[in-house]
Image (cartoon, helix red, strand yellow):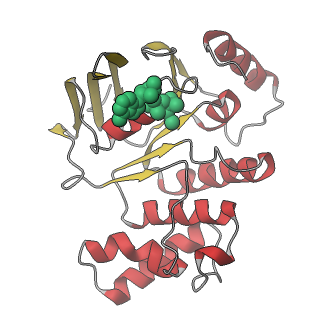
Amino acid sequence: MDSPLLDVSMSKSFGKIDVLRDIRFRVRPNEFLVVVGPTGCGKTTLGNILSGIDKPTSGHVRIMGEDVNPHIHNISYVLQEPSCIPWYTMMQDVTMGLEIRGVGRAEAVSRGSEVIKLVGLEGYENYYPWQISGGMKQRVAIARAYATSPDLLIMDEPFGHLDAQTRYLMQIEIMRIWEQDRKTVVFITNNIEEAVYLASRILVLTKLPATIKKEYVVDIPRPRDLTDERFLEVRAEITQQCEIVE
Ligand SMILES: Nc1ncnc2c1ncn2[C@@H]1O[C@H](COP(=O)(O)OP(=O)(O)O)[C@@H](O)[C@H]1O
Ligand SMILES: [Mg+2]
């Protein structure tokens, strides 16, 4: 493997509860890695540790060879619950991270316009969260995550609360963005179809305590067709491996 962007080898427990057991994997630059596993298996715990906001009990998470530190490394983390500041316009919200980093207003607005356009929300720059739909809020969260041009983008079930139609549109959208800028993504989901649609590679987690059960390289050409024979084959195989009861 080329030198990895992310190098993970760790375990995590909360008191006596083992949550993540001997999780080892690497992520190459420009990869779209999807981690799929059943609800409650420790996916959010993993996202928190990869992003550096929580620490493993043992082992390490290294980004570009250094122990991950959210204050030093440029990592964006998109959560399941889209969170927008109620009194911020979309532009203010999306440029928040840039301003914290000391980027001047004019440059921040220029970058803000770029990422708002990237997620298809051009024209809504002055809207407040209460004026937009749930799907749009999730796009704002994604635009905000992209605004700082992160080295690593972590997404934890970002489409979990969306209706099926919006979810599908967002999957197409996120692929379109990834094909444009090839940011390294770790995308966490409990949805196997979503995993197969998006991933370059999939890690399948077991139930609690989560271990990596299997790894799949998904080489189906993009854009992927959910009804394509090969797609259905891969999906069926992963479904067999997963302990997800839906
Ligand atoms: N801060 C915490 N303290 C104690 N237990 C926790 C904490 N965070 C998560 N857990 C436990 O870890 C397990 C995995 O949770 P989580 O990572 O949220 O799973 P998932 O995101 O896959 O649904 C659950 O049993 C949960 O109760
Ligand atoms: Mg979770």
Q: Nearer the viewer, residue 54 or 104?
A: 54
Q: Residue at x 29, y 38 (%)?
A: 5
- 99 vs 153: above or below: below
Vertical arrangement, residue 49 with respect to residue 74, above or below? above
Q: Position of residue 164 (x, y in %)?
A: 78, 45
**Which quadrant does the C terminus fall into?**
top right
Residue extending farthest to the left is: 66
Number of marks in picture: 0
Q: Position of residue 240 (x, y in %)?
A: 68, 10
Q: Quadrant of the N terminus?
A: top left
Q: Foreground: 203 or 181? A: 203
Residue lying farthest bottom? 106
Q: Position of residue 21 (x, y in %)?
A: 34, 15
Q: Residue at x 28, y 39 (%)?
A: 54
Q: Quadrant of residue 180?
A: bottom right
Question: Could you say where residue 213 lies in the image, as x and y percent from the top left?
Answer: 48, 11
